[in-house]
Image (tube, helix red, strand yellow):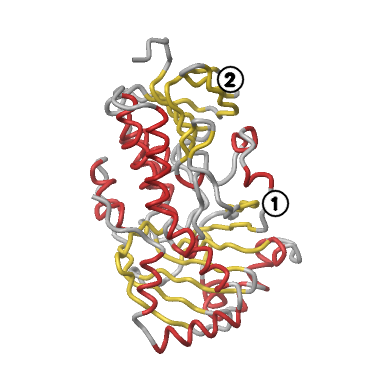
Amino acid sequence: MNNIAIDFDVIIAGGGLAGLTAANILGRDFKVLLIDPDDYPRHKLCGEYLSAEVENILLDLGINLPKATDVKLKKLLFSTQNGNKIQADLPLGGYGISRFHLDHLLFKKIDQSVAIKKDKVVEVNMKLSQFVVLTKHEKFTCRQVIMATGKRSVLDKNLSREFVQHKSPWLGVKCHYEFDMPLDQVELHNFNGGYAGLSKVENGNVNLCYLATFESFKKYKDIDDFNREVLSQNPHLKLFFQNARPCWEKPIAISQISFDNKSAVQNGIIMIGDTAGLIHPLCGNGMAMAIHSAAIASKCILPFLKDETSREDCLKGYEREWKLAFNSRLRTGRWLQKLFLNPTATKVGLGIVKNIPSLLPLIIERTHGKVVY
């Protein structure tokens, strides 16, 4: 039994989908502090396609997805750079729901016993059997730290995480538009140096989110120029930009997006969501992975907090469960992205899939998990 005085049982750094899910689960029985620098609700760079595999996790937290959004995504349309297309049913299907809406729903469900601080965690150290967490303004102690700070953060750098040492060639852009497209369809369109996803969200707007190499982007003066000169080479995206009306003054853009392998545990800290591993956006599984990883982490931490197991067993158990749940789909995502960014390989692959239509749903299944109960 830990008799050292501590401020909290668990401190969660970062309040995105993963951090909010963990706060909801662990806050039922333990003293939890959630630290995030931003206000809710807020827009985040995200494809905003939520796989139905985590529907039951959210239902257990009091969020009924069919009531939260009427956008039930059942079909995929994929096109190559020259506009050749193929359609397929999504094996599990999913929901079109914005991060603005879903993050806020999770935030509102957090138990009143969970403390929330608008601040940023900058350093985490372990002393004896407890963690000391430093923010920009305060210091706290706890038994376990969960890091859910997203794709890249100051804390990653301070922990000397391996992926931060390498420059990443990727940048992401997202904006909401008014545009008429099928309510049940998510679209994935290839262009030179990247690919773009289109799907509706709960308020009827269309989310455009794309990933591009910095190499392809740097030749152009701004995002509008890049959209016009590069994305619009794909006829489907050209039609979109000719008819869509942006809902925001300017899009969200993030650079240095890394798909390198990351550790699920480092220095005794449990990583969840994108902090533990970022799946390539073309897989449409990032939101579900964030929620699922938080549920796995919570399940592994609970016995430790109840003094039923050691910290070492807790951390080993989480690493094992995380790899079992996500390693295979991350590998498939890396393979698919290499394929999609090679025009010749994409053309050959599309021809094969057109001749064997059952192949595409099987590939989609490899990038997703099973329904979590």
Write down the residue under mark 2. 137
Helix, strand or loop under label 2: loop
Horizontally, residue 173 falls left or right of residue 367, namely right
The alpha-carbon separation of the residues under discs 2 and 1 comes to 30 Å
Q: Measured from the top left, where is residue 342 in percent x and y? A: 61, 76
Residue 250 or residue 211, whichever sits in front: 211
Q: Do the residues labelled 2 and 1 touch (CB within 8 Å)?
A: no
Mark 2 or mark 1, which has the lower sequence index? 2
Residue at 38% from the left image edge and 10% from the top image edge: 3
Write down the residue under mark 1. 167
Vertical relation: 330 (above or below) 359: above
Residue at 45% from the left image edge and 42% from the top image edge: 272
Q: Measured from the top left, where is residue 284 in percent x and y? A: 43, 61
**Comparing labels 2 and 1, the label whose residue is closer to the camera:** 1
Vertical relation: 16 (above or below) 281: above
Residue 127 or residue 211, whichever sits in front: 127
Q: Measured from the top left, where is residue 64 in percent x and y? A: 24, 49
Vertical relation: 118 (above or below) 187: above
Quadrant occupied by the N terminus: top left
Tell me which corner region of the image, top left, top right, bottom left or bottom right, holds residue 228: bottom right
Callout 1 amino acid: Lys
Horizontally, residue 1 falls left or right of residue 125, namely left
> Going by the picture, which residue comes out furthest to the bottom?
355
Helix, strand or loop under label 1: loop
Horizontally, residue 357 falls left or right of residue 237, namely left
Q: Measured from the top left, where is residue 332 in percent x and y? A: 47, 65
Callout 2 amino acid: His
Tell me which corner region of the image, top left, top right, bottom left or bottom right, holds residue 66: bottom left
Q: How busy is the neighbourhood of tag 2: few (under 14 within 10 Å), some, or many (20 plus)?
A: few
